[in-house]
Image (tube, rainbow, N blue to C red):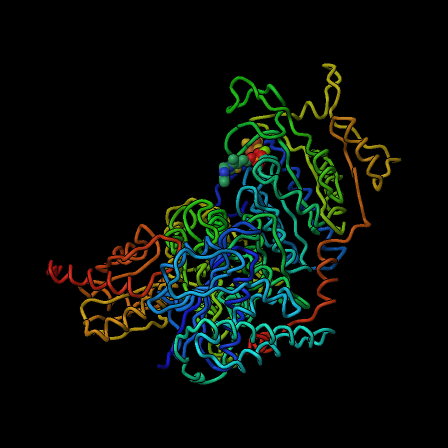
C-alpha cells in the first residue's frame, strides 16, 4: 500500500534484491489465497527491523495484516500471533542481522517447539539499513564500515545452524528466481511446523553479490548458486546435511520433516485432556 | 486477661517447615473465624539457609505483620540469636532443646522437637508438636487444632486416619510440654467471625485468580522470584479449549509473545520481577506505540540488578512508569493488600482493554507470599471490560484521529500495520512532524480514560496528610490509626491507581501543605513523582528488604510533622 502513500518515505535502492523477494511473497500469498479460499486478512506479516523488514509496508495488492515491531524480535511476536489466533497464516520477514545476530536466541526455542509459521530471511551479508556494517554472514576479512581492517569473525553458515537447531522445513534460494522462490514460499507456508526460507538477497549498495551468485563464464567466475538435484530426498536429515556441506548456495528444499507435531498440536492435546476451570469454582477452592 | 491478637515467628533453617507451620496456624485459626496474616522470607538457596515465617492471629482485621513477637519458635541457635531481641516483654521463646540450649533463661522453654515427634509414630509431626505448644500458650482451644488436622488430612487416601491420629497426638504432646513450662500469655479472645464469606489466599494467587475473573486467556512467562508462583498457577489452572499458557525462553520472548497475543485479540499477560521488567522495556514500548492491550505484573523484589531476590522493596516504580525509551507514561496499578491484588488484576485488564495499551500491575514480595483471609469476591458484581473492536470493511485507518479508535482483529477486515516506528493512520512508517505530534498526543490522550478511578481519603481538612502506596498501606494505616488516637491532626489519602492518579485526588493533594509518603526505597520514588505533578510531597524511606514496623513508622511521621510545624513552611 505504501508505494502510493506519500507519507511513507522509505525506498529500497535500485536493484536491491528485496524487490524480487517482494514479488515472490506477493505471488505466494495470492497462491495461498486461491488454494485455501481464505481472505488476504487471514495472513499476518511480522517484520524485523532493517531494509528487509520494510517488506511489510511495500507489499502491493490486497493487504494482509502486519506488524513492524522490534529489531530481532519477530519470532517471539509471531509466536504470540500464531498461538493467539491459530487459524492465521503467519509469515516472518527479516534480514540476516535481525534474524541471525540480535534475534538468534529466538530460533532454537521455536525450532524445538515446531511453531507453525514461515520465516523468509533476506540475507545480504551486511547491515543495510544502518549503512553497511558487518553481519554474521559477512565473510571473514571483509572490509565493511565497522570492520575497517577486515572482519575478524568467520562467517556463520546459517543453513547448518538451522538444521542443527531442528528447523522442520528448510529451503535456500536467491532473490532473482522470483517464480521458483514464490512457489517455495507457498510450499513452506503449507508445511505444518517451523519453516525457514533463507534467501540470498544482495544489497546493491553495500555488498553486491549478484555476480558471485550467478557466476560469469566470460570472466571465469563459477556460480555460487546450484540447483539441488531432483533425486535429493529432503525427508532425510543426513542428505540435508550433505547438501549444506557441499557449500555454495543450494537452490530448493533442503529438508522437510512432516512427522513432527507442531506446537499447536501439542497445545491442543493438552487442552483436550484438561477442562476449563470456572472462576466460581476456583474461588471456592480458596474458601476457608 | 484476654488477648485480641498474637504474633508468632517460626525461625530456623530452610526445609524445616517454617512456612508450613505459619500457614498451618493461619489456616486453623481462620477456619474458626479469626483474622490471619502470614509473612515469609526465604533465603534464595534451595536447601538450608536462615528462613523465617510469621503468623498473626487477631480478632480484628490484620493490617500489618506485627512489630514484635509474642512467641518465637527457634529451631536452632542461629535463629534464636537472630530473632530473640524482637520478642516482646512478656513474650515467650520455645526452643528446640534437641538442637541447642540458649545461654540465659528468660521467658523460654525447650522441647526436643524430633524426639517428641518420634513418640507420635510420625517423625514428620514436629510442626504439630510446636503448634500444640503454641495453642496452649495463647489459650487457643485444643478443639480448633484437632478439627483443623482432621480436615486437612482427610484426603481420601489410605493411611489418612493414621496420620490424623499421630498429628493429634503431637498436638497433645506439645500442649503438655507447654503446660509443664508454666508460661502462659493469657487467653485469646474468642473469634469475632468476619461478616460474609471469606477465602484464604496469598497475593500471587489473588493476582492470578483476578486475571481469570477478568478473562485472561493467554499467558507467557519466565520463572523469577517472587513471581514464579503465578506462572506455575497459570500452567495448572488456565486450562481448556482456547487457552494458551507457556513458559518462554526469556522475558524478552515473553513480552513479545504477549504483544503478539494482544494484537491477535487475546487478553494477554505475563508476570515477572525487576530483572525481567528491565528486559521487557523495549517490548512495552512497542505495545505503547502500536496501541496493543496487555498486562505485565511486576512482583517487586529488592535492589537493582539481581539485588535481593527474596526480600521486599518498592523500588521499581520509576522503571514501571517509563520502562522503555522515549515519551511513555505507563499506566500502573499497585495493590496495597492481598484483597486489592485480586481487584488490581481485574482492573489492569480493564484498563488495558479500555485504553488499548500495556498496563503494569506493580505487586511486591511482601504481598505475593502473604496468606490472608479476605472477603470472598463476588464475581457477579465485577465489571469486566472488553476493547472496542472494529467491525467494518477493509480500507480502515486504524490510527486516525487524536483519540482512541476501534481495534481491528487479524482474520477479519480492517488490516493495518502495528508499527513500533512512528506511523501514519494505517500504520506505515513516517517521519512527518505533524504525524509525530498527532500520534504522540493521541497516545497520551488515551490516559484520560483511566483517571477517574476511586481513592480513599479521610480527615481531608488536615493540611498534612499521609499517602502510602502499595504494600506500605498496611503498616501506614495502622500507624495512622495510632496517631489519630493520640490526637494528631493528620489526613489520609490512598489509591492503588498510581498512574494516572485519580484527578480529583491529585487536585486535593496539591492543596496540602505536606504529603508524607512512606515507601520502601532509597530515592523516595513516589514523592518525587508527586512533586513533579505539583504536590509538596516528602518520603519516609526504608531499604532493609523488610516492611515498615508500625511503631517505627508512627514515630518517624510524628518527627516529620513536628519538623514541618517548626519550620512553619507555607509555600
Ligand atoms: C535494539 C536495536 N539495536 C539496533 C538497531 C539499529 N538497527 C536497525 S536495522 C539494523 C541491522 C539491519 O540489518 P539486517 O537485519 O541484516 O537488515 P537489512 O537492512 O540488511 O535488510 C540495526 C543494527 C535497532 N533498530 N534496534
Ligand atoms: S541498502 Fe542495500 S539492502 Fe538496503 S535497500 Fe539499499 S540495496 Fe537494499
Ligand atoms: Mg542484512
x and y, in percent, of residue B62 in the image: 40, 73
Q: Which quadrant of the structure image shows residue B181?
A: bottom left
Q: Residue at x 49, y 45 (%)?
A: A8
Q: Is residue A261 above or below residue A12?
A: below
Count the marks: how many? 0
Decide if residue A167 is on the left or right side of residue B419: right
x and y, in percent, of residue B313 in the image: 40, 55
* Quadrant (top left/top right/bottom left/bottom right) for the N terminus of chain B: bottom left
x and y, in percent, of residue B460 in the image: 23, 74
Q: Quadrant of ligand 2?
A: top right
Q: Nearer the viewer, residue B359 or B80?
A: B80
Decide if residue B34 is on the left or right side of residue A103: left
In the picture as drawn, the residue positioned furthest to the top comes out as A219
x and y, in percent, of residue A102 in the image: 56, 38
Residue A90 appears in the picture as rendered: yes
Residue B387 appears in the picture as rendered: no
Q: Nearer the viewer, residue A145 or B346?
A: B346
In the picture as drawn, the residue positioned furthest to the right comes out as A231
Q: Residue at x 42, y 60 (%)?
A: B401
Q: Is residue B29 above or below residue A164?
A: below
Q: Residue at x 72, y 49 (%)?
A: A114
Q: Residue at x 65, y 42 (%)?
A: A107
Decide if residue B547 is on the left or right side of residue B484: right
* Quadrant (top left/top right/bottom left/bottom right) for the C terminus of chain B: bottom left
Amino acid at each position: 500500500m505504501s508505494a502510493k502513500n506519500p507519507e511513507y518515505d522509505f525506498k529500497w535502492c535500485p536493484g536491491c534484491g528485496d524487490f524480487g523477494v517482494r514479488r515472490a511473497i506477493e505471488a505466494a500469498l495470492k497462491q495461498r489465497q486461491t488454494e485455501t479460499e481464505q481472505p488476504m486478512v487471514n495472513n499476518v506479516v511480522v517484520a524485523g527491523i532493517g531494509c528487509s523488514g520494510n517488506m511489510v509496508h511495500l507489499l502491493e495488492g490486497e493487504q494482509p495484516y502486519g506488524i513492524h515491531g522490534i529489531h530481532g524480535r519477530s519470532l517471539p511476536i509471531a509466536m504470540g500471533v500464531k498461538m493467539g489466533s491459530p487459524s492465521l497464516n503467519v509469515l516472518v520477514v527479516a534480514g540476516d542481522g535481525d534474524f541471525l545476530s540480535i534475534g538468534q536466541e529466538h530460533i532454537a526455542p521455536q525450532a524445538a517447539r515446531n511453531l507453525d509459521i514461515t520465516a523468509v530471511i533476506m540475507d545480504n551479508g551486511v547491515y543495510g539499513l544502518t549503512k553497511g556494517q558487518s553481519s554474521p554472514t559477512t565473510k571473514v576479512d571483509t572490509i565493511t564500515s565497522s570492520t575497517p581492517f577486515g572482519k575478524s569473525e568467520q562467517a556463520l553458515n546459517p543453513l547448518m545452524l538451522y538444521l542443527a537447531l531442528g528447523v522442520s522445513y528448510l529451503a535456500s534460494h536467491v532473490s532473482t528466481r522470483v517464480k521458483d522462490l514464490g512457489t517455495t514460499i507457498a510450499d513452506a507456508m503449507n508445511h505444518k511446523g517451523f519453516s525457514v526460507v533463507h534467501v540470498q538477497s544482495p544489497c546493491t549498495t553495500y555488498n553486491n553479490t549478484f555476480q558471485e551468485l550467478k557466476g560469469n563464464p566470460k570472466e571465469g567466475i563459477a556460480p555460487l548458486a546450484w540447483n539441488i538435484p531432483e533425486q535429493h530426498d529432503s525427508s532425510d536429515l543426513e542428505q540435508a546435511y550433505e547438501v549444506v556441506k557441499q557449500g555454495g548456495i543450494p537452490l530448493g528444499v533442503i529438508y522437510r520433516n512432516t512427522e513432527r507435531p507442531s506446537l499447536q498440536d501439542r497445545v491442543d492435546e493438552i487442552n483436550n485432556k484438561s477442562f476449563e476451570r470456572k472462576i466460581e469454582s476456583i474461588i471456592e477452592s480458596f474458601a476457608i | 486477661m484476654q488477648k485480641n491478637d498474637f504474633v508468632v515467628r517460626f525461625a530456623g533453617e530452610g526445609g524445616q517447615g517454617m512456612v508450613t507451620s505459619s500457614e498451618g496456624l493461619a489456616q486453623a485459626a481462620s477456619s474458626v473465624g479469626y483474622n490471619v496474616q502470614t509473612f515469609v522470607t526465604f533465603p534464595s538457596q534451595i536447601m538450608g539457609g536462615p528462613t523465617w515465617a510469621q503468623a498473626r492471629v487477631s480478632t480484628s482485621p490484620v493490617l500489618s505483620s506485627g512489630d514484635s513477637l509474642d512467641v518465637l519458635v527457634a529451631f536452632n541457635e542461629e535463629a534464636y540469636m537472630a530473632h530473640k531481641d524482637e520478642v516482646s516483654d512478656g513474650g515467650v521463646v520455645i526452643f528446640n532443646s534437641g538442637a541447642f540450649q540458649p545461654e540465659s533463661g528468660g521467658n523460654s522453654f525447650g522441647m526436643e522437637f524430633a524426639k517428641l515427634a518420634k513418640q507420635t509414630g510420625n517423625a514428620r509431626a514436629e510442626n504439630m508438636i510446636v503448634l500444640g505448644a503454641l495453642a496452649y500458650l495463647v489459650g487457643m482451644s485444643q478443639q480448633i487444632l484437632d478439627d483443623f488436622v482432621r480436615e486437612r488430612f482427610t484426603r481420601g487416601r489410605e493411611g489418612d486416619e493414621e496420620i490424623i491420629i499421630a498429628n493429634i497426638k503431637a498436638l497433645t504432646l506439645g500442649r503438655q510440654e507447654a503446660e509443664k513450662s508454666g508460661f502462659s500469655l493469657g487467653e485469646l479472645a474468642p473469634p469475632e467471625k468476619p461478616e460474609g464469606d471469606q477465602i484464604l489466599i496469598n497475593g500471587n494467587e489473588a493476582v492470578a485468580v483476578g486475571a481469570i475473573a477478568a478473562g485472561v486467556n493467554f499467558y507467557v512467562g519466565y520463572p523469577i522470584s517472587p513471581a514464579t508462583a503465578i506462572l506455575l498457577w497459570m500452567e495448572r489452572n488456565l486450562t481448556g479449549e482456547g487457552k494458551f499458557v507457556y513458559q518462554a525462553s526469556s522475558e524478552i520472548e515473553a513480552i513479545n509473545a504477549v504483544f503478539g497475543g494482544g494484537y491477535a485479540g487475546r487478553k494477554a499477560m505475563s508476570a515477572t520481577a525487576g530483572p525481567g521488567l528491565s528486559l521487557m522495556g523495549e517490548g512495552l514500548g512497542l505495545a505503547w506505540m502500536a496501541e496493543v492491550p496487555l498486562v505485565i505484573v511486576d512482583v517487586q523484589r529488592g535492589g537493582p540488578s539481581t539485588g535481593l531476590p527474596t526480600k521486599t522493596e518498592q523500588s521499581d516504580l520509576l522503571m514501571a512508569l517509563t520502562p522503555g525509551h522515549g515519551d511513555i507514561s505507563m499506566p500502573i496499578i499497585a495493590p496495597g493488600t492481598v484483597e486489592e491484588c485480586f481487584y488490581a488484576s481485574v482492573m489492569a485488564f480493564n484498563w488495558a482493554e479500555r485504553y488499548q495499551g500495556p498496563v503494569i500491575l506493580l505487586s511486591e514480595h511482601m504481598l505475593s507470599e502473604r496468606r490472608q483471609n479476605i472477603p470472598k469476591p463476588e464475581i457477579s458484581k465485577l465489571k469486566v471490560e472488553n476493547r472496542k473492536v472494529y467491525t467494518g470493511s477493509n480500507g480502515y485507518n486504524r490510527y486516525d484521529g487524536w483519540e482512541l479508535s476501534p481495534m481491528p482483529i487479524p482474520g477479519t477486515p480492517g488490516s493495518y500495520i502495528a508499527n513500533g516506528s512512528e506511523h501514519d493512520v494505517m500504520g506505515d512508517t513516517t517521519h512527518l512532524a505533524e504525524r509525530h505530534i498527532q500520534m504522540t498526543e493521541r497516545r497520551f490522550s488515551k490516559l484520560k480514560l483511566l483517571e477517574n478511578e476511586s481513592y480513599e481519603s479521610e480527615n481531608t481538612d488536615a493540611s498534612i496528610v499521609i499517602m502510602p502506596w502499595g504494600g506500605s498501606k498496611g503498616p501506614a494505616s495502622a500507624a495512622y490509626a495510632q496517631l489519630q488516637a493520640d490526637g494528631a491532626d493528620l489526613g489520609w489519602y490512598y489509591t492503588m491507581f498510581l498512574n494516572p492518579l485519580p484527578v480529583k485526588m491529585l487536585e486535593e493533594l496539591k492543596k496540602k501543605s505536606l504529603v508524607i509518603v512512606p515507601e520502601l526505597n532509597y530515592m523516595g520514588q513516589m514523592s518525587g513523582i508527586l512533586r513533579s505533578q505539583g504536590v509538596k510531597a516528602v518520603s519516609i524511606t526504608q531499604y532493609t528488604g523488610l516492611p515498615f514496623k508500625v511503631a517505627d513508622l508512627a514515630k518517624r511521621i510524628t518527627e516529620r510533622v513536628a519538623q514541618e510545624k517548626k519550620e512553619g513552611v507555607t509555600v
